[in-house]
Amino acid sequence: MIETVSSENAPKALGPYSQALKVGGFVFCSGQIPINPATNSIDAVTVEDQTRQVITNLKNVLEAAGSSLSNVVKTTVFIKDMNDFVAINGVYAEMFGETRPARSCVEVARLPKDVKVEIECIAAL
């Protein structure tokens, strides 16, 4: 059985997709960008602040699903500029703490709304 997950504490989907789906003991989170759900805008300017907002959005979706950042098993990080890797990695390590999910990181030509970072994840329930 597949269950749709939605959180008011994360941005609404920008297209025909769900914030996340629960299936088979896992939560599959769509990529989050640094939209502040309270203002529905991108308030963060620096790549560090954008990364914090992205991971906060993921955290809120995971919590709505009954999971948490500590249960994340895989992330994919999409970044606009590989030169931002160290800054993004620092915030990522800070926010995930001792959790060390498997991860891929790729530089992309463009992200929605021209943001600097997008992250998707899979977490255990």
Image (spheres, rainbow, N blue to C red):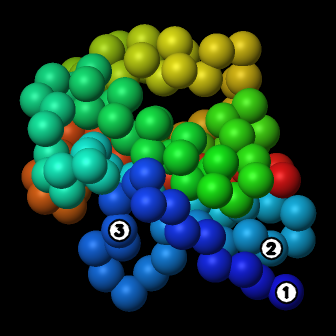
Identify which amino acid the numbered label 2 is placed on: Val
User: Contact, CB < 8 Å: mark 1 with mark 3?
Assistant: no
Pointer 1 residue: 1
Q: Is residue 29 left or right of residue 56?
A: right
Q: Which mark is residue 23?
A: 2
Q: Position of residue 71 (x, y in %)?
A: 77, 39
Q: In this view, does 25 lie to the left or right of 32?
A: right
Identify which amino acid the numbered label 1 is placed on: Met
Residue 72 visible from this viewpoint? no
Judged from the image, the secondary structure of the residue bearing numbered disc 3 is loop
For marks 2 and 3, the one nearer the N-term is: 3
User: Contact, CB < 8 Å: mark 2 with mark 3?
Assistant: no
Pointer 3 residue: 12
User: Contact, CB < 8 Å: mark 2 with mark 1?
Assistant: yes
Identify which amino acid the numbered label 3 is placed on: Lys
Q: In this view, does 114 lie to the left or right of 91?
A: left
Q: Position of residue 110 (x, y in %)?
A: 17, 55
Judged from the image, the secondary structure of the residue bearing numbered disc 2 is strand
Q: In this view, does 75 lie to the left or right of 36?
A: right
Q: Residue 93 carries which label?
A: none
Q: Measuring 80% from the left and 61% from the top, which residue is drawn there?
A: 26
The alpha-carbon separation of the residues under discs 2 and 1 comes to: 6 Å
Q: Residues within 10 Å of mark 1 (few under 14, many from 20)?
A: few
Q: Measuring 27% from the left and 21% from the top, which residue is drawn there?
A: 48
